[in-house]
Image (spheres, grey):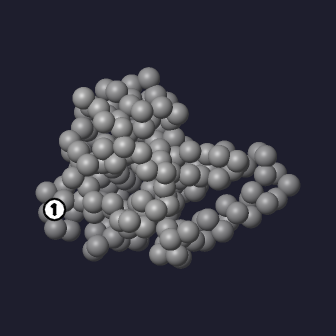
């Protein structure tokens, strides 16, 4: 809940609309779209609770880039959520990537399920860089991803791998960590 109390009005409105969709007669048909909408708002909200090292940005006013690799499950929702918003004086920019080589610059990288067969290669490409990797793929955290969205009975839960996060030099707010299931899996 701590995440919800500090969200901008636009993001809260999006979550309110999602709640109405889930409560309506078409709830079974809208669960997938609603989960994607909630995940889009979470991507935006992560920027409020994660700090990047100064060298993660080319200039002091460079945008915070939210990237999507693979099929985009969010449509216009993510773009609309971050439109005209800032975090620590930085505007947001949403970029869509088709190839691993194009992921630069990127601060929050959502890796679509369409890329599940390439997770190892993708995570190796951004390893030790200040990139917050996020996905809803089933074995994402087991392969070295940082935040995994888990849909459980129409609710979104977060699983955060602290070891994967530590390698990126990102600093996580205790508010974010309290709202998630925190794991620590040592990897070679």
Percent x, y of residue 65: 32, 55
Give the image location of residue 31, x and y in percent.
Answer: 70, 48
Q: Count the numbered circles shown.
A: 1
The residue that appears at 70% across and 63% down in the rendered structure is 19
Residue at image position (33%, 70%) is 87
Of 171 and 22, nearer the camera is 171
Query: Which structural element holds mark 1?
Result: helix
Q: Quadrant of the N terminus?
A: bottom right
Q: Is residue 34 above or below residue 120?
A: below
Which residue is disc 1 drawn over?
54
56 left or right of 15?
left
**At 26% across and 55% down in the image, what residue appears?**
170
**Residue at left 27%, top 74%?**
89
Mark 1 Cα within 10 Å, few/some/many (few <14, many 20+)? few
For the residue pair 147 and 20, the one nearer the viewer reads as: 147
On the image, the x and y values in percent for residue 9 come to 53, 76
Question: Is 11 left, or right, of 152 in this rendering?
Answer: left
């Amino acid at each position: 809940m701590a995440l919800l109390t500090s969200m901008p009005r636009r993001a809260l409105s999006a979550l309110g609309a999602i709640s109405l969709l889930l409560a309506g007669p078409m709830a079974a048909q809208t669960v997938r779209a609603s989960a994607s909408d909630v995940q889009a708002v979470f991507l935006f909200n992560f920027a409020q609770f994660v700090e990047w090292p100064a060298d993660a940005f080319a200039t002091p006013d460079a945008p915070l880039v939210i990237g999507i690799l693979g099929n985009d499950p969010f449509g216009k929702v993510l773009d609309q959520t971050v439109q005209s918003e800032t975090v620590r004086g930085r505007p947001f920019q949403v970029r869509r990537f088709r190839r691993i080589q194009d992921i630069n610059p990127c601060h929050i990288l959502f890796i679509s399920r369409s890329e599940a067969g390439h997770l190892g290669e993708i995570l190796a490409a951004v390893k030790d860089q200040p990139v917050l990797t996020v996905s809803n793929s089933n074995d994402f955290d087991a392969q070295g991803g940082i935040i995994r969205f888990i849909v459980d009975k129409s609710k979104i839960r977060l699983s955060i791998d602290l070891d994967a996060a530590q390698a990126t030099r990102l600093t996580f707010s205790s508010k974010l960590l309290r709202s998630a299931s925190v794991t620590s899996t040592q990897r070679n």
